[in-house]
Image (cartoon, rainbow, N blue to C red):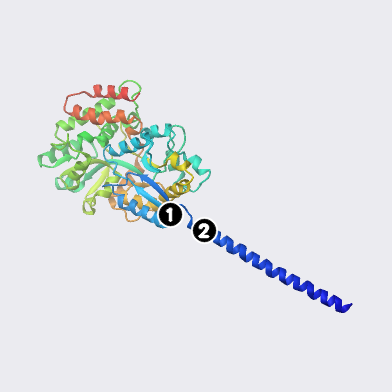
């Protein structure tokens, strides 16, 4: 009996060992199969081509940084190829391209574009994604951007469609070395400004590098200096604002005093910038992005300040034009495409990371949308940030409230004729009001 039990025990042990061996083999096979499956998944990851359009192209100071960012992204995601169609936003060509692309169903997968009035058409047409919908599935997109900045990006329907990289400020950039050379006080008051115009003109220096036919920044500041922050926000839905009329007349007065270059009527923005950069002009109204395009030696000679208050003007002396008015949009078409959705979201998440925001802010001198410390800023950029910090009011530009057609009418069909005395501000603003309805 004992012998039989011994034989039976050995038989049971043999069966158990065989079962374990087979089981282990089965697990190994399962593990191998899983490994094989993972590799297969990686190897079979579909190739994706994304198309992106931004204003980080051409002469924009952020171009080099942005192009390197795209290379870094493609190194990290080798299955993704990016077709970069970025171009500078100077002039109307960029706006026209983006709007035409969206209107014809040829929208880019990712677009870095303006907010406000410029974006109303593509938002109302349902062409771009609200981030609230994206965040339900991809909560980390734009995570580095501070909550306050995100809130400032809400459109009229209370949704966020664009994630910004840097904010901006605009102001009067001054070659303080030229002012010192001619014993002039900096143009912190209108009287100082007029004195500087007289002295510089007498010494063959252009007082203002102002492109009359592309006078976007000049319109903003001459109206702000006369109308103040509240008047600057007028959307022309009532009586014609007298302060806007006076602001445009102030520009005409300076034109008649020969405050601008002799060819200012035909000069574009880039030529005006070059006039200042070559130190042939003493002042220019520009934005924080202008700093990145200036040589270091010139930056050391420059400072930036608010536009001086016009005579009887309502502006607080610290008020400036500033804010966040651009950001990354994701097209509805790309997001709804299952083969692109993850890639396009990853790309925007990468481009709006803290490191990328810091890199762009370093390049263009703008105010970063994330809580990052930008090292090595020139003193000029620091002065700009301080100017923005001291400002009692920061207004978004007029063209964020008027329709593009209405604002461009002031630029192209208004100011050049007003300064020449061929049209009155009242005539121009009446037409602008009609276009803005």
Q: Would residue 178 be found to the left or right of residue 434 on screen? A: left
Left or right of 338, for residue 232 = left
Give x and y (percent) for residue 317. Answer: 30, 37
**384 w.r.t. 314: above or below:** below
Residue that sits furthest to the right in the current view: 1
Q: Residues within 10 Å of mark 1 (few under 14, many from 20)?
A: some
The quarter holding residue 114 reads top left
| Residue 23: % across, % down | 68, 66
Pick the front one: 308 or 124: 124
Task: Determine whether 312 is above or below 15 in the image.
Answer: above
Marks 1 and 2, the one that precedes in the sequence: 2
Q: Residue at x 46, y 38 (%)?
A: 130
Note whether residue 184 is visible: no
Tag shown at residue 430? none
Which image quadrant: the N terminus? Answer: bottom right
User: Which residue position holds label 1?
Assistant: 79
Q: Residues within 10 Å of mark 2 (few under 14, many from 20)?
A: few
Label tally: 2
Where does label 2 land, which residue? 40
Observer able to see residue 20? yes
Residue nearest the observer in this picture, 213 or 4:
4
Figure quadrant of residue 415: top left
Give the number of the mark in front: 1 or 2.
2
Q: Residue at x 54, y 59 (%)?
A: 38
x%, y% of residue 198? Answer: 13, 37
Identify the residue at horizontal 42%, vertical 39% (top origin).
153
Spatial CA span between label 1 and label 2: 14 Å
Helix or strand or loop: what does disc 2 sit on?
helix
Quadrant for residue 123, please give it.
Answer: top left
Quadrant where the C terminus is found in the figure: top left
């Amino acid at each position: 009996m004992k012998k039989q039990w011994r034989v039976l025990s050995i038989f049971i042990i043999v069966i158990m060992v065989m079962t374990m061996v087979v089981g282990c083999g089965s697990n190994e096979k399962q593990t191998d199969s899983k490994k094989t499956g993972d590799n297969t998944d990686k190897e079979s990851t579909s190739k994706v081509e994304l198309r992106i359009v931004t204003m980080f192209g051409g002469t924009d100071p952020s171009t080099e940084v942005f192009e390197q960012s795209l290379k870094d992204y493609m190194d990290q995601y080798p299955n993704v190829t990016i077709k970069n169609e970025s171009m500078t936003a100077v002039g109307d060509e960029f706006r026209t391209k983006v709007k035409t692309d969206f209107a014809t169903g040829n929208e880019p997968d990712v677009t870095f574009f303006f907010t406000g009035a410029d974006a109303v058409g593509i938002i109302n047409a349902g062409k771009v994604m609200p981030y609230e919908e994206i965040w339900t599935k991809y909560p980390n997109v734009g995570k580095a951007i501070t909550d306050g900045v995100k809130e400032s990006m809400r459109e009229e329907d209370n949704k966020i469609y664009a994630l910004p990289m840097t904010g901006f400020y605009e102001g009067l950039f001054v070659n303080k070395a030229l002012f010192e050379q001619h014993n002039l006080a900096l143009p912190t008051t209108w009287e100082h400004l007029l004195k500087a115009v007289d002295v510089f003109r007498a010494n063959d220096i252009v007082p203002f590098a102002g492109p009359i036919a592309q006078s976007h920044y000049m319109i903003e500041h001459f109206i702000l200096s006369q109308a103040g922050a509240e008047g600057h926000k007028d959307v022309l839905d009532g009586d014609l604002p007298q302060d806007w009329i006076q602001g445009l007349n102030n520009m005409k007065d300076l034109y008649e005093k020969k405050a601008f270059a002799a060819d200012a009527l035909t000069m574009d923005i880039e030529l005006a910038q070059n006039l200042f950069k070559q130190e042939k002009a003493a002042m220019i109204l520009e934005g924080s992005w202008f700093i990145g395009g200036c040589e270091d030696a010139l930056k050391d000679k420059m400072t930036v300040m608010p536009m001086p208050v016009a005579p009887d003007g309502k502006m607080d002396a610290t008020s400036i034009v500033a804010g966040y008015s651009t950001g990354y949009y994701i097209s509805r078409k790309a997001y709804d495409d299952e083969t692109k959705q993850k890639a396009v979201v990853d790309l925007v998440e990468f481009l709006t990371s803290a490191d990328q925001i810091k890199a762009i802010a370093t390049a263009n001198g703008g105010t970063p949308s994330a809580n990052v410390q930008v090292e090595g800023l020139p003193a000029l950029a620091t002065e700009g940030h301080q100017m923005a910090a001291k400002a009692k009011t920061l207004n978004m530009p007029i063209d964020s409230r008027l329709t593009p057609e209405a604002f461009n009418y002031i630029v192209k069909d208004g100011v050049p004729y007003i300064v020449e005395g061929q049209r009155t501000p009242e005539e121009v603003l009446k037409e602008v009001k009609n276009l803005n309805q």
